[in-house]
Amino acid sequence: MAEWTDRAISLGLRRFGETGAILEVFAREKGRRNGMVYGGSSRTKRAPMQPGNTLSVTWKGTEGNLGFFTAEAEDERAARLMANAESLAGLAAITELLAAVLPEGEAKPALFDASETLLDLLTEEEIWPALFIRWELGLLSMMGYGLDLDHCAVSGSNDGLTHVSPKSGRAVRGSEAEPYLDRLLVLPQFLIDPRAPATPVDIHAGFRLTGHFLIERLFADLNRAAPEARYLMIDRLERAGRLSPS
């Protein structure tokens, strides 16, 4: 019988049988994994394993089978965010995106660390939407769908970048983009200049940019739709005035 222990982000818990549950996690060194939790449907065990919480998990079983988890909460973020609808929607979007795209058992420690950082900063209302967009760019890159936002696809220059080609994922300078504006995606300046502010209009453009490549490339190749939680998060941000199309 094999056994391992790791830090993990809970991606969800679903009831199994009368008293058990199946826990899905993103473990730092072991990747996305599933396992049975004895008594996991009880309120006392279910609460610490809510999506978005960081856990210390121990898995036991034989490779290729479901196996069993024991888990202890290290950080119960979900409870802290209950009073903030936008941040709670952000937490759901993060965990559902990870659950949908991560291959089983493939370690991605850099993505784990970035995801934990973003989850920790969901309490910072003024900054987390911009960080979420950066995280989605990182997710695309780590899944093999990275964008080139460093140089103009036409001139090769690294200044004056304003748009992104929806076909190539490469940045374009404003002077080169002008004849094709109706076909290009806006590149928010905060993604290439850390000093630039992230206005509600920029946040809208950023989510439109990452959403295009998530939906048209990553999820299209996976032959599935993007999680509804991402759309709900964007809707909540727009209702709160933190995202605006114009």
Image (cartoon, rainbow, N blue to C red):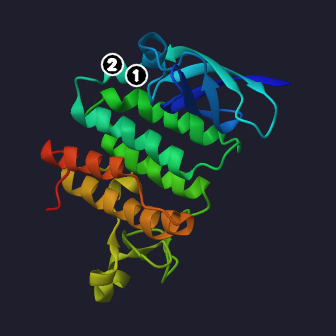
Q: Is residue 214 above or below residue 108?
A: below
Judging depth in this view, the residue of 106 and 203 nearest the camera is 106
Judging depth in this view, the residue of 43 and 190 nearest the camera is 43
Judging depth in this view, the residue of 217 and 60 nearest the camera is 60
Q: Position of residue 60 (x, y in %)?
A: 75, 23
Q: Name which residue lies at 30% across and 24% down.
A: 81
Q: Is residue 87 above or below residue 1?
A: below
Cβ–Cβ under 8 Å for marks 2 and 1: yes
Judging depth in this view, the residue of 217 and 118 nearest the camera is 217
Judging by the rendered image, the residue that carries numbered circle 1 is 77
Position of 74 with respect to 6 (left or right) is left
Quarter of the picture holding the C terminus: bottom left
Q: Name which residue lies at 39% across and 45% down.
A: 132
Q: How many marks?
A: 2
Quarter of the picture holding the N terminus: top right
Q: Name which residue lies at 48% across and 62% down.
A: 224
Looking at numbered disc 2 in the image, what kind of residue is underneath it?
Answer: Arg
